[in-house]
Amino acid sequence: MQKRILIVEDEISIVELLTMVLMREGYEVTSCQTGRDAINMMKEFHPHLVLLDVMLPGLDGAGIVKIMSQDEMLMNIPVLVTSALVESAPIFQPYPQVKGFCSKPFVLTDLVEKVKKAIGD
């Protein structure tokens, strides 16, 4: 069975790059551009992993993780946080579902390695 990844990212060029790279690795990938859409997409798509940007329109990455941590349906979905703001990484340390931090710009081989580790491949 193909593992599913949800990319929550508002920059279309990054979504396209990550989608291409992750599909080439054999994952089923979908995406959304806002924090509000992310929660609904998680409940519909049932991802095995969420790649979550910190800075998003509406609800930001920290708000999404907080909601996930309080929702039984979402609290066990692993999350990899992505951001150019490396200093935002400590915000996510209290949440056990956050499995790592990927700084932008990405080193794609490192990102794929972190994805595989977080998703259990």
Image (cartoon, rainbow, N blue to C red):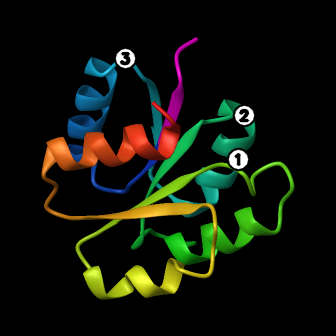
> Disc 2 versus disc 1: distance between alpha carbons?
6 Å
| Alpha carbon separation for disc pair 3 and 2 | 20 Å
Is residue 77 toward the left or the right of residue 55 in the image? right
Task: Please provide percent x and percent y for residue 12.
Answer: 27, 46
In the rendered image, residue 18 lying in the magenta stretch gets the answer no
Residue bounds of the magenta highlight = 1-6
**Which residue lies at the image location 51% right of the left edge and 70% below the top edge?**
61
Question: Which one is earlier in the sequence, the residue at label 1 or at label 3?
Answer: 3
Q: Secondary structure at mark 3?
A: loop
Q: Which residue is mark 2?
A: 44
Amino acid type at mark 3: Gly
Label 1: few (<14), some or many (≥20) within 10 Å?
few
Identified by mark 2, the residue type is Glu
Is 3 part of what is drawn in magenta? yes
Residue where numbered disc 3 is placed: 26
**Viewer can see residue 14:** yes
Which residue has dot 1 on it? Answer: 40
Q: Quadrant of the C terminus?
A: top left
Residue at the top extreme, as displayed: 1
Between 3 and 66, the residue placed more toward the observer is 3
Within-10-Å neighbours for mark 3: few <14, some 14–19, many 20+: few
Marks 2 & 1, CB-CB < 8 Å contact: yes
Q: Quadrant of residue 113?
A: top left
Mark 2: give few (<14), some (14-19) or many (20+) Cα within 10 Å.
Answer: few
Which image quarter is the N terminus in?
top right
Q: Disc 1 or disc 3, which is closer to the eye?
A: 3
Q: Where does the image place residue 74, in percent across and percent down from the top left?
A: 75, 52
Amino acid type, residue under disc 1 in the picture: Asn
Q: Is residue 60 visible?
A: no
Reply above or below: 25 against 56: above
Q: Secondary structure at mark 1?
A: helix
Secondary structure under tag 2 reads helix
